[in-house]
Image: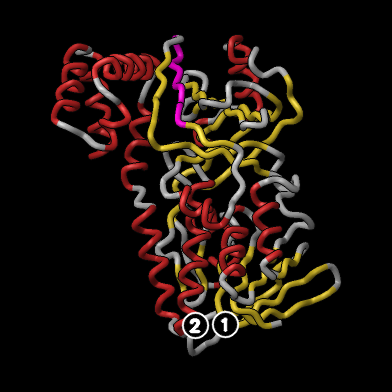
Amino acid sequence: MKCDVLVIGAGPAGSVAALYSAKHGLNTVLIEKDNRIGARTNTRIDSSPDFGLTEIINELGLKTENLVYNSKWHSPFGSSFTLHSKTGEYYFKRGSAPDSFECSTAYNSMKSCCELILDAKIKSVSINKKRRSINEVMISQSSNKIMIKPKIIIDATGENSPFLRFLRITKREYKKGEIFGMTGKDFVSPDASEIYFDAALIKGGYFYLVTGKNGISSAAVVLDSAKMQKTADKYFYEYLRRNRAVAEKIRYVDHSFYGKTNLFTLPEHVNKNVLFAGDAAGLIDPLMGYGMLPAIVSGYYAAKYSVEALEKGDYEMLKKYEWEVRKRFNRRMSYAFRRIFESLDNKDLDMLIKMANELEDRTDVDDLMVHPSIGGVFHALNVFFDNLPGSGRLLAKGFKGIFI
C-alpha cells in the first residue's frame, strides 16, 4: 500500500493531521493500535486556552463543547478571584463516544477519503540507508500483515513513540503527571472554569471543575507524580472530604477517568521524513498540563508543511515544521513558572489571590498581562508595596524560580 502521508495514532494530534492532509488532497492513511478510537480515554472534558486555536477550529470545523472567557481561581483559605479574559478557553470532549473530539475529527477525515486502519500494530520499519528516511512500515492487523510505503510519516503515537527508538532519538525527561476525576452533569455553571489550589493537599497540582454547554461536566485533580505518596484517586477523594462545598457540586456522576503523562523535550521534532506531533513531540504545557492546544496545533502544522513539501516536491520544507514548533512552544518560561508554582505554600497562594483582587479593583488584570502599560504597572507596584512583606516573599521565590 502506497500513500502520501501515514499518520500514526488517532488521538487529537493524529486525527487533526489526518483531516488536514485528506482535505488538501493527499492520499492519507490513519492507523490506530486500538480497535476503536479513544479507547484508552474514558469520557471527560479537557480544556485549553485559545492561543491560535480559533483559526484552526474554524478552518477544519473541529468539534468543541464550550468557549468560556471567565476563570475562577480559589485559594485554600476560601478567597477567590475571577479572571475575565479576552482570550477564550475551549472545552473538548474526549473518549470513544462518536461525538468526542478525536472520533468526530477522524470521521471527518474519512469523509475526505482518508483510510482508517484500526487494531494496527507496528511490527517493523525499513530505513533507506542512503537518505536515512523511513520508506516502509510493516503493520499487523489480527493475522494480516500490511506493508505501507509512505512519503511522509506524522508520528502522533504518544509519549512512548516507537519511532524515537527506530530513529535513535533521545528524549530528555522532565517529570510525570497524573490525573483522576469524575464526569457527570452540571457540576458548575458553563460560563466559567473553576480551579482550586491547595499546596498542602495537592502539592504541585490543582483541582478543577468545567462544564460544557450541554451540561457535560468533569471534575479532576491534576498531580505531580514525584510528589505523590498515594494513588491519584485517593488525592481526589481526600480533597473532596476536606472541601465539602466542592464535593456538593459533584452530584450527578456517570463515571471516573484516569490518565498519566510524561513531560519531556526532544532535540528535534523532524527527522528526515518523520514529523513528531502531540504527546510524541513532548509538547504538553509544563505549568498547567494542557495537552489539547499543543496536540491540535502541532497536528495541524505537521500536516500543513507535509502538504507544502509534497506539492512542491521539496522535503526540505518539512524543516519549517521544526521552526513552527519551536516558535509556538518555547517553554522556558513555563518551566520557570512551574518551579515558582511548586515553591508556593498556602499562605503564598492566598496572598496571590488577594493581590489579584486588589489589582482588579484598580485596573484590568487581563489587559495588564497582555498589553502592559505605564498606568497598569504603577497599579501593580502599589498593590505590591501595600502587601509587604508577604509580596516580597513571593518576589524572592519568583526570582529563584526564574534565575536559579
Task: Return the residue at label 2.
Answer: 132
Label 2 or label 1, whichever comes before in sequence order: 1
Q: Quadrant of the C terminus?
A: top left
Identify the amino acid type marked 1.
Ile
Q: Look at the image and give the residue range highlighted in magenta.
A: 69-77
Residue 20 % position (x, y): 56, 64
Residue 13 % position (x, y): 57, 56
Q: Is residue 365 above or below residue 310?
A: above
The image quarter in which residue 94 lies: top right
Residue 194 % position (x, y): 51, 23
Is label 1 in a helix, a strand or a loop? strand
Identify the amino acid type marked 2.
Arg
Residue 7 % position (x, y): 61, 67
Q: Is residue 72 magenta?
A: yes
Please report the residue visible at 16 percent of the width from the left and 15 percent of the height from the top: 385
Q: Quadrant of the N terminus?
A: bottom right
Q: What secondary structure predominates along the stretch shown in magenta?
A: strand
Is 229 left, or right, of 39 in this rendering? left
Task: Return the residue at label 1.
Answer: 127
